[in-house]
Amino acid sequence: MCLTDEWFFFFFFLGVPEAEVTWFRNKSKLGSPHHLHEGSLLLTNVSSSDQGLYSCRAANLHGELTESTQLLILDPPQVPTQLEDIKALLAATGPNLPSVLTSPLGTQLVLDPGNSALLGCPIKGHPVPNITWFHGGQPIVTATGLTHHILAAGQILQVANLSGGSQGEFSCLAQNEAGVLMQKASLVIQDYWWSVDRLATCSASCGNRGVQQPRLRCLLNSTEVNPAHCAGKVRPAVQPIACNRRDCPSRWMVTSWSACTRSCGGGVQTRRVTCQKLKASGISTPVSNDMCTQVAKRPVDTQACNQQLCVEWAFSSWGQCNGPCIGPHLAVQHRQVFCQTRDGITLPSEQCSALPRPVSTQNCWSEACSVHWRVSLWTLCTATCGNYGFQSRRVECVHARTNKAVPEHLCSWGPRPANWQRCNITPCENMECRDTTRYCEKVKQLKLCQLSQFKSRCCGTCGKA
């Protein structure tokens, strides 16, 4: 019995006196609001809770009689008006997984490859409908290459590790004794792929070499993206396509220019100019010049070249070897270097910048630079111990041959030796009062003993003062 607003039950009993009628459902007595006249029973707003065994008992003074009937409520599969339950079930099954609900008209979910997804089949009916899933119109249990799990008594389908073979239409068929309902949803795998389209412009307008290269594009859902996204995809093999293979109009053909007759000062170079026709076969044949003059002006076959001045570097004789000493017996000498024409006209140096420039300085042997540093022996140390001892020596630049002193700048090419150094910087063995320098008599004569620095060094002499 399908759901409706009202249902009547009629049982006819005859008896004298008139029998009293009582109704039961599943052996439980029904209240009087359900009763109608002549023993009939009215059910209003029928729902699945009204399903059960209904019994009618008629009784009078002479006895009683009971009749029963089974009421089975049938509710065909349909989409519930409230979807909170199925949404909560999806969230509990896969909190972080993308999901979609099927519908009679169909829904869609776009996903990246490798992901998993949940499909929910919202359905209600009585008895509880049996749910069967399909992929591409075939029962999902027979699908190959599809990793899936049916959960929650068929209400949820989980599809794992999505790929190109996983996309397409998924449908759930709900059926019970009262009817059937089909709902569907489509999974679209968002993936990159190479597309071959749109030929490039032909490389030639005529002749036998024109080709067009097919253009490769990396697409995502029919939208062009950076080709780097398709790096892992198999690149289609593309072959150039011949195009514009036809005879060319007559045209002027020129050879390369010959070498210039002069390297500077103005020369001439020539080339060969002919009128030719290029065939579709690739063969070029000479034709009358008149056939080309109608198309374009004849190119020149002679032109001037290397118009720049003929220039060169010139230089004077080397000067005397009297420059600064740079080593033993070595000095520096100079000469003038300048740019000029071959006729002797002086020009700015920039005019000769393309030519290697001669050197303007060089090393030379000089008797005046035969010098070296000479040092004397160190003097005696001014102290035998303590922190104030020093000694000195004489340092001078001398000529190697004459052994006579010369100006020190002639020896500046080498480091000048030190002319003093500290010495005997050791602790004194005892602390008795004694002189530690050789100049204490002078200190006493100059009356410097009252100064602490001299008093400590000349303790013996100053103590006698």
Image (spheres, grey):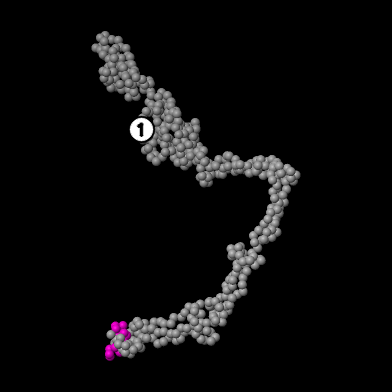
Q: Determine whether 457 is above or below 25 in the image.
A: below
300, 144: nearer the viewer: 300
Q: Residue at the left extreme?
A: 61
Left or right relative to 295: residue 166: left
182, 142: nearer the viewer: 182
At x 29%, y 83%, the residue is 452
The total number of labels drawn is 1
At x 40%, y 84%, the residue is 391
Q: Is residue 85 magenta?
A: no
**Residue 122 in the image: x percent, y percent?**
40, 31
Q: Residue at the top extreme?
A: 16
The quarter in which the C terminus is drawn is: bottom left
Q: Is residue 454 magenta?
A: yes
Residue 381 visible within the image: yes
Which SS does the magenta portion mostly show? helix
* Residue type (three-letter) at the residue carrying disc 1: Glu
**Residue 297 in the image: x percent, y percent?**
69, 45
Residue tagged by mark 1?
84
Left or right relative to 311: residue 287: right
At x 57%, y 78%, the residue is 321
Under circle 1, the secondary element is: helix
